[in-house]
């Protein structure tokens, strides 16, 4: 159920008669190479959340489209600080609590948001009665994730027509390097993504296709749906996977 499309009496009745959970998708507005739109992270996480909400009758809130993407400078990004994102989410959750919704899933679509979601756990804006679970969708697929590479481009081809494969080019690929070397590269990329990737792409999108994108998308939805159900049945997973 998309909250934005509903009428007040319908929502209040749903809350009153059902022990319901709310879902907040969180994305970003940042460069994704020359072939994907800057809304890519938000587009993917929105579709994932729409599907799990449909299948489980969750209340789906509008996507928070701005994230922590300063690392993509000087390429295009519209960013908010970690503390701002965390506070926005905390205020939303507090408002949901005041509307008697005590189970909230925050589903993340951008790596740079992770610290803000971890900070969210430490905030005391809402009561202990409210259970908040935060997950990043790419942790629910078997493939290694990338940025505007094969996986992310395939996902976009599966859910959107706004992809220009004619402009898809190979990006940075770490290859066979040690865990220590990868850690150094990841740390550098977290501060300046472009200094590592040069063209803003991590991976190679040239062979991306909608067929694989649909398979990856289905895997994410299935695994994330199971995780959400586990959370609601009383088990206590780590706040951020």
Image (tube, rainbow, N blue to C red):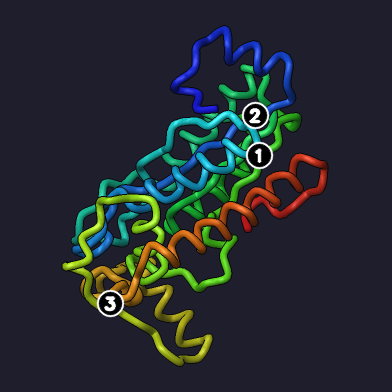
Closer mark to the observer between disc 2 and disc 3: 3
Q: Which residue is mark 2?
A: 126
Helix, strand or loop status at disc 2:
loop
Left or right of residue 72, residue 68 in this image: right
Q: Between 194 and 26, which is closer to the camera in this rendering?
A: 26
Neighbour tally class for label 1: few under 14, some 14-19, many 20 plus, Cα within 10 Å:
many
Q: Is residue 231 left or right of residue 211?
A: right
Q: Residue at x 53, y 55 (%)?
A: 137
Work out whether mark 3 precedes mark 1 in sequence or the reverse, and give the earlier one: 1
- Dot 1 corresponds to which residue? 132
Position of 68 relative to 232 (above/below): below
Q: CA distance from mark 3 to mark 1?
A: 36 Å
Question: Residue 171 bears which disc, if any?
Answer: 3
Residue toward you, 111 or 109 = 109
Mark in the foreground, 2 or 1: 1
- Give the CA distance from mark 2 to mark 3: 43 Å
**Spot occupied by residue 222 in the image (x, y as percentages of width and height):** 63, 54
Q: Residue most toward the top?
A: 9
165 on left or right of 156: left
> Do callouts 3 and 1 mark residues in contact (Cβ within 8 Å)?
no
Location of residue 119 in the rendering, given as x and y in whole percent from the top left corner: 56, 47
Residue occupying the point 43% across, 37% down: 63
Mark with earlier residue (2, 1): 2
Which element type, helix, strand or loop, lies under badge 3? loop
């Amino acid at each position: 159920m998309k909250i934005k499309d509903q009428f007040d009496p319908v929502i209040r009745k749903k809350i009153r008669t059902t022990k319901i959970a709310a879902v907040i998708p969180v994305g970003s507005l940042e460069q994704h190479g020359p072939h994907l739109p800057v809304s890519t992270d938000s587009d993917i996480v929105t579709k994932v959340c729409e599907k799990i909400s449909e299948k489980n009758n969750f209340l789906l809130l509008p996507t928070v489209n701005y994230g922590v993407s300063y690392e993509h400078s000087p390429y295009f990004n519209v960013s908010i600080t970690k503390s701002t994102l965390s506070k926005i989410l905390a205020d939303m959750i507090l408002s949901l609590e005041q509307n008697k919704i005590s189970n909230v899933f925050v589903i993340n679509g951008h790596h740079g948001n992770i610290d803000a979601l971890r900070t969210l756990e430490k905030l005391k804006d809402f009561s202990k009665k409210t259970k908040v679970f935060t997950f990043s969708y790419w942790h629910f697929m078997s493939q290694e994730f990338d940025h505007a590479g094969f996986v992310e481009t395939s996902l976009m081809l599966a859910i959107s027509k706004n992809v220009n494969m004619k402009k898809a080019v190979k990006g940075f690929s770490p290859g066979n390097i040690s865990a220590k070397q990868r850690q150094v590269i990841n740390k550098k990329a977290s501060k300046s993504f472009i200094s590592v990737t040069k063209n803003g792409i991590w991976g190679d999108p040239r062979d991306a296709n909608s067929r694989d994108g649909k398979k990856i998308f289905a895997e994410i939805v299935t695994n994330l749906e199971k995780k959400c159900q586990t959370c609601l049945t009383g088990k206590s997973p780590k706040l951020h996977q």
